[in-house]
Image (tube, rainbow, N blue to C red):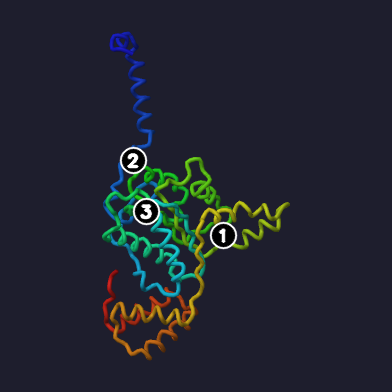
Amino acid sequence: MSHDDARFLDPGLIARLDRIASALERLAPPVAPPVDFDAADAFVWHADPDGFQPVPSVNRVPLELLKGISRAADQLIDNTLRFARGLPANNALLWGARGMGKSSLVKAAHAFVCAAATQPGAHPAGSPEGSRMRQLKLIEIHREDIASLPRCLARMRDSGHRFIVFCDDLSFDRDDTSYKSLKAVLEGGIEGRPDNVIFYATSNRRHLMPRDMMENERSTAINPSEAVEEKVSLSDRFGLWLGFHNGTQDDYLDMIRGYVRHHDLKIAPAELEREALEWSITRGARSGRVAWQYIQDLAGRLGATLKSD
């Protein structure tokens, strides 16, 4: 409508139209500002309001201190390196015993690949895109924010970076339906997972569902095998399954000795072994978490300061 035409409109109508337009503008969601993914190597995704919080220093354990999980470490690092080079790679589910280094391995693999990208020869001149190392960002999403995962991925889709989206301790309880949106994002949706994003999750459950929930579905269904197929199929979206099992006594002591050397703690070997085994007995486990808790106790008694990695 031209200005000449507007002269013949009722001023009251024009005022009402202006108020309606203003109301619609207030109802419209604000345009999300661009994300500066160069601000850090790692971010935490928060929903409501949506945003990426930079993490200046990631809390992680050096890869060489993760003992008893070498096979899983080799597989995850190889998968992550391929992804960083733009080659095909799988979503990964790290499942199994508590405290055996599942989340620590994800963070260590990210650090390893980031370090590899800065080495000479990582970006050879004239190399094809598929063989070049790309900047790799680690994005942590909390379990309670899984429903916002599609919005999170949308913010990363057009970025020049590559992303590991990481959810620690992922599991779903009875009557929780948010796993359906995760299934669609991982493989089944129209858009699917962006090519520059891979999803890593840790869980104590292989199928991400409590056993009693799945058994109850099986016992009450007309066709028991079909009743649990939808829930079991969630873990099938992860092409790489890495199992973590309770450590042996030798694994546990290797962890302890590795920490002692790394942090330069002064204690006699025989005394160290005796104390470490006694500590594990009182905790009822021989895991990496228990080993680290002993090291913190030992350092405190020695008056030593632990290195920040």
Residue at far right of view = 222
State how far apart marks 3 and 1 are (Cα).
30 Å
Instruction: Give coordinates of residue 273: x percent, y percent.
Output: 40, 87
| Image quadrant in which the C terminus is located | bottom left
Disc 2 + disc 1, Cβ < 8 Å: no
Disc 3 + disc 1, Cβ < 8 Å: no
Instruction: Give coordinates of residue 299: x percent, y percent.
Output: 31, 80
Query: Between residues 79 and 293, which one lies in front from this camera angle?
Result: 79
Three-letter amino acid code of the residue under disc 2 = Ala
> Against 272, is 125 above or below?
above
Query: Between residues 137 and 75, which one lies in front from this camera angle?
Result: 75
Q: Is residue 146 visible?
A: yes
Query: Between residues 214 and 94, which one lies in front from this camera angle?
Result: 94
Q: Is residue 45 visible?
A: no
Three-letter amino acid code of the residue under disc 1 = His
The secondary element bearing badge 3 is classed as loop
Three-letter amino acid code of the residue under disc 3 = Arg
The image shows a total of numbered marks equal to 3
The secondary element bearing badge 2 is classed as loop
In-image side of 66 versus 33 (left or right): right
> Against 100, is 144 above or below?
above
State how far apart marks 2 and 1 are (Cα).
35 Å
Instruction: Give coordinates of residue 214: x percent, y percent.
Output: 63, 59
Q: Which residue is mark 3?
A: 85
Q: Which residue is mark 2?
A: 32
Q: Which residue is mark 1?
A: 207
Residue at left 44%, top 66%?
102
Residue at left 44%, top 45%?
150
In-image side of 123 versus 200 (left or right): left
The secondary element bearing badge 1 is classed as loop
Of marks 3 and 1, which one's residue comes earlier in the chain?
3
